[in-house]
Image (tube, helix red, strand yellow):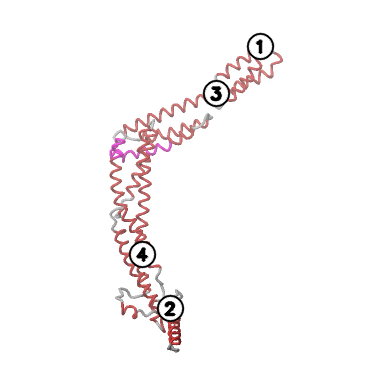
Amino acid sequence: MSNPTKPNVFKTAWQRIKLIAITIGALGAGVAIVNLPIPGIREAIGQKAPILLLPSIASWDYHYQEGMVDLEKAEQLIQNAKHPNDLDLGDRELKSAQSHLSALPLQGFENYNDSYYCYFRNCRWQFSSWEIQQRRESAGRTEAILYQERNLQSQLRESTDKIGDHQKNYPKATNETEKQTILTQWEREISQINLLNSNSLMGRIANTEHDRIRIDFQKITGLNQATNQSGRLMEGAVPFALAAQKLTEGKSHDVAEWQAIIRQWGSAIGQLQSIPVENPDYVKSRKVLADYQQQAERAKIRLNQEANAATLLQTTESQINTLVRNHTSLNRDQAKAELMEIEARLKKIPIGTTAYDQAQDWLRSLRKRLE
């Protein structure tokens, strides 16, 4: 015979289970709500029922412990770096540490009672805003060291790249002026690397690179350090030479422009002539001086050509104007003779002068008249 009360027993047990589950869910939801990152709620609960904040305190403890481990690794790798790879590893550890420390609230720790949590776990910190601030400042100082190392690394890479270009371009230079320009820029980059020398990883690497690059510079250029230092006396001539070369660009220049070019070459020559015989770079400076003097002489020749061409064009124009005024009093043979004389004068105006194009226009017009 069946027991009629058995279904009621099962029903009652199931209802109890549901009630327990609902209660547990409600409690879990309530705990989750009071642990939301809302200072007002958490502070109120911390004063009345601090045990409910155990999940938050456990999370803070986790982030603090992990942040401290990562920060110690970052400080060790960055502050005592032996190789650039240590900086990369330290950078990753520092970012991880900062992420953990950023998960910690900076204010209001004094309103929470951590004794319930620390009773079961051996807390290694005081759960204070001051302590978190100190750790964040330590991370900031380590980040500043890393930034300085990265900055030095970038400057060193930029200078060594430029020096590599100078090493390639120096053997290809075709004259002393071009070589001197490359040497000046090369020396400037070597000096820049020397300025990076400091008691840091990249500073020590820069010091080593400076010594190596200096040796390579001496081997390639044949200049020792004493010669290099005294060679700076020639740097003053380079800007004038470059300015003269810049002014020379173009098809033609008038008298005033050629005079300006000659003045620039004269300033460059004056700088080199001031180098005394006892200077280690005296012999080398004579080679550069010879090149500058040759360039100046060419400029003087072009100046004379330009001046003569301008004068010839002016006198020829006067002759043409006279012919136009008197053409009615001249017979055909006389006029033709005058035109041929004018043509001969115009042909003397050399190419490369500002008068050349005007002379060619007049020649084409004369030839039509002579046909």
Task: Find residue 172 and report its image quarter.
Answer: top left
Q: x%, y% of residue 21? A: 43, 80
User: Spatial distance from mark 4 to mark 3, Cα to Cα?
Assistant: 79 Å
Task: Specify which label sits upstream in the sequence, 4 or 3.
Answer: 4
Which residue is disc 2 drawn over? 28
Asked if 229 appears above or below 299 in the picture, the reply is below
Q: Main secondary structure of the magenta part?
A: helix
Asked if 362 appears above or below 60 in the picture, the reply is above
User: Spatial distance from mark 4 to mark 2, Cα to Cα?
Assistant: 30 Å
Task: Specify which label sits upstream in the sequence, 3 or 1.
Answer: 3
Which residue is disc 4 drawn over? 97
Which one is nearer the viewer's eye here, 143 or 353? 143
Say what amino acid the circle numbered 3 marks.
Ala
User: Spatial distance from mark 1 to mark 2, Cα to Cα?
Assistant: 124 Å
Which residue is disc 1 drawn over? 334
Q: Where is the C terminus found, in terms of image quarters? A: top right
Magenta residues? Answer: 216-240
Q: x%, y% of residue 66? A: 34, 67
Task: Specify which label sits upstream in the sequence, 2 or 3.
Answer: 2
Judge depth for marks 1 and 2 and give the one in front. 2
Which one is nearer the viewer's eye here, 75 or 335? 75
User: Spatial distance from mark 3 to mark 1, Cα to Cα?
Assistant: 26 Å
Task: Specify which label sits upstream in the sequence, 4 or 1.
Answer: 4
Q: Residue 244: say if magenta.
A: no
Asked if 77 appears above or below 242 in the picture, the reply is below
Say what amino acid the circle numbered 2 marks.
Gly
Q: x%, y% of residue 347? A: 56, 18
Judge depth for marks 4 and 3 and give the one in front. 4
